[in-house]
Image (cartoon, rainbow, N blue to C red):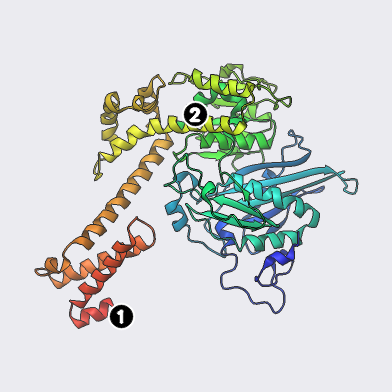
Amino acid sequence: MDALSSAGSRPARGRLGALSSGAQAPAAPWARFSAWLECVCVVTFDLEVGQALELVYPSDFRLTDKEKSSICYLSFPDSHSGCLGDTQFSFRIRQCGGQRSPWPTDDRHYDSGAPVSLQKESSHYFGYVYFRQVKDSSMKRGYFQKSLVLVSRLPFVRLFQALLGLIAPEFFDKLAPCLEAVCNEIDQWPAPEPGQTLNLPVVGVVLQVHVPSKVDKPDCSPLKQCGHKNLLPTPLVLSSVHELDLFRCFQPVLTQVQTLWELMLLGEPLVVLAPSPTVSSEMVLALTSCVQPLKFCCDYRPYFTVHDSEFKEFTTRTQAPPNVVLGVTNPFFIKTLQHWPHILRIGEPKLSGGLPKQVKLKKPSRLKTLDTKPGLYTAYTAHLHRDKALLKRLLGGLQKRRPPGALAALLRTHLLELTQSFVIPLEHYMASLMPLQKSVTPWKDDFLRSLDHAGPQLTCILKGDWLGLYRRFFKSPHFDGWYRQRRKEMVRKLEALHLEAICEANIETWMKDKSEVEVVDLVLKLREKLVRAQGHQFPVREETLHRAQLNIEMVIGSLPKDLQAVLCPR
């Protein structure tokens, strides 16, 4: 890679991001970079102090001491994992304190168009890690151990893993100058725009991605219609910025997928004990994504260690386990978290191919020793009957060596349709309450009574205790999250309809018998609605915004000059 030629027209910067002499700072430094990433960190192993933060780039991004400590510990595989070579995984940590970025970004435009499950995290950071551990006789410890970490508030695991796969090998060869050039390239990227297909150049490669929109259909393939045929170099097309291969992730638990889907839907506490951070983080991310299009409203940690600042909070026995999904690799957690209601232990991956050994459902009382066998340890009884036909198709497809992509699509479609079948009756019932004037409590029983004629059986063939599943769902964090989101959307829709109604009304006729106070009040309210609509706080057409502005000007023009001066000061 020609490292420094990619910096383009950005001002010259010294090592670690300091401006070189004579260079002018840009008006909005790192504005485009911050639309994708918060910062890039390098973590190395120091023989005396252990994991140490070698550098943060751009250097003016501020991390708290607690965040630095978490990033350091979570960027290295646990000693029990024994990861040699190159390893990729991810983690998620709490953001400590308020917004501290010196280049603040307005996320409202992106969030207004993105699916709720892919909106930017407001209180957590994602860490995407590329860890290298190789023998090196020149190092005191005998090993080169270093991690390159991308810190972001976007849950784009596929994109950032692909990005690390391109830049990390270059970085380990060329170190800081390479990192500076890469960050400058990312700072030239267009901002993530829901519904758009973007070309993102980095280290001589163009990543082509489609940023999901809330109006995208699940079965659409927008990249196939992209018109960049003559783009050089030929783009590396990513089929998704966020979706993992669910079939690969769930291979060892296929017989328990439906039970795990119910546990995720209900927001139950779950520990995933895996042989490596890669398996741990992918399993947790796969589990939390299997309830899409619902937003996963509980906490989750794709990779978690005993050094985490929330360790005591999550392991205390003085209260019920929190609603969190923890991915761990240290068997010590089996002893520490024996009181948790659901523990999934995954064995070493099968290297010879073929059908992986399926984990079995086991009673929690069997969970006693650190060498506990793989299995799902839980007393939970699934409400729905297992879809044996789907299981047969998946396992049969694996034995017949069907393309992995086809099996992954089959499983993802099944889980999506299962979630939609569960949510659609709720959506229909909620829509019947427009305009919403009832509280949550009274309508639960009304809804349950409606299931006989408008329940999931209309769209799903699975039999079972749907009623019991809904009753438990109403007590879960996901019902509260879903309800708040739908209520918010309804209020926004009502506001949009109200603004359109005002713009279509004959305001001049309305004003004839109104006092000046009432007319001024109309101007102020119209202005407030216009500002909120322009800030993407509720959806309206451009034509409506234009008519609202004309109405405001017309109403102000009808008022006495002194009031006009107050409302439109020069």
The answer, for residue 317, to whether it is visible in the render is no
Question: Which quadrant of the figure has residue 424?
Answer: top left
Mark 1 or 2, nearer chain start: 2
From the viewer's perspective, is residue 30 above or below residue 221? below
Residue depth check, mark 1 versus mark 2: number of the one nearer the observer: 2
Q: Residue at x 37, y 57 (%)?
A: 537
In the picture, the disc for residue 261 is 2
Label 1 neighbourhood size at 10 Å, few (<14), some (14-19), many (20+)? Answer: few
Q: Residue at x 59, y 20 (%)?
A: 396
For the N terminus, the image quarter is: bottom right
Question: Which quadrant of the figure has residue 317?
Answer: top right
For the C terminus, the image quarter is: bottom left
Left or right, 472 with reference to 286: left
* Depth check, front residue: 536 or 518: 536
- Residue tagged 1: 569
- Identified by mark 1, the residue type is Pro
Q: In 3D space, how far apart are the residues under numbered discs 1 and 2 (Cα atoms)? A: 59 Å
> Residue 471: x and y, percent?
36, 27
